[in-house]
Amino acid sequence: MIYLLLGEDSQAKDKKIAEIKESFLIQPEALFFDFESLDAQTVSAASLKKSLIALPSFSSKRIILIRHLQKLKADPVSVLLAFAESPSGDCEVILEASTELKSPLKEVASYAKVLSFGVKAELNVFDMTKLMSAKKTTEALRMLHEFYDQGMYPLQLMGVLVWYWGKEGRALGNPRFEQGLKALEEADLNIKRSRLQPEYAIEKLVVELVEIQR
């Protein structure tokens, strides 16, 4: 079967993806050998074809997830359409897209079970800082990636984290406050001097500031 998860509510889509995976990938090894996540922006036609025809190792079926389907290039679209017209019984395909699809992806959608996940409410950056104060690192990082998906730049988030630490860090006492300032300074240098990808530099900073508060 082909599933098309359409909409902007990424958390709801991730929950559905997890449900599909759990229904087919029973053994722990299956998560490594029978599940593959592909990014439509970078996958080639040859790589996609290879993934779609591969046989499962530990499960009755392989699960292929293709994210950002709306950005799939012409050659991989042809491969996916050919699969949709004559699907393999060894493979379940999950297609994820945030926007309505244009032709020829509309043709692919006509073969899929379409599940709509609506539009998620606009996120507030201060909700992320609340998660950081609650020491919920995983949830804060998930929200951080949603900000990136909405087009927010790392330097915008850097400003919020500077404000956050100035407000919250002082209550921890000078040693830990200074430790957080050093983490902020390092992140700023990592971004400006291209030591790390800006997105990763901010992700690393979020983890460090939460850990300092523990």
Image (spheres, rainbow, N blue to C red):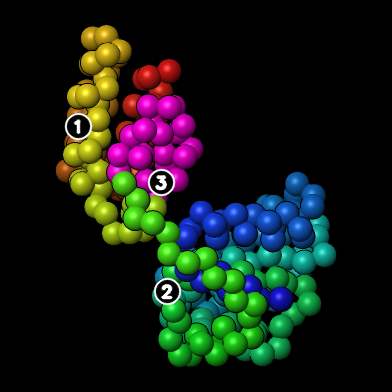
Q: Is residue 51 above or below residue 15?
A: below
Q: CA distance from mark 2 to mark 1?
A: 34 Å
- Residue 75 in the image, given as x and y percentages of width and height: 48, 85
Q: Which mark is residue 163?
A: 1
Disc 3 residue type?
A: Met
Image quarter hosting the N terminus: bottom right
Magenta stretch contains residue 27: no
Q: Is residue 10 something one can see in this rendering?
A: yes
Magenta stretch contains residue 139: yes
Q: Which mark is residue 143?
A: 3
Q: Quadrant of residue 205?
A: top left
Disc 1 residue type?
A: Trp
Q: Is residue 145 above or below residue 108?
A: above
Q: CA distance from mark 3 to mark 1?
A: 18 Å
Disc 2 residue type?
A: Thr
CB within 8 Å, label 2 to label 1:
no
Q: Which residue is mark 2?
A: 99
- Residue 199 in the image, given as x and y percentages of width and height: 32, 47
Which residues, given as a range, are shown in magenta? 125-145
Q: What SS does tag 2 mark?
A: loop
Q: Is residue 175 something one can see in this rendering?
A: no
First in sequence: mark 2 or mark 1?
2
Q: What SS does tag 1 mark?
A: helix
Label 2 crowding class (10 Å Cα cut-off): few <14, some 14-19, many 20+? Answer: some
**Count of all numbered marks drawn on residues in the image:** 3
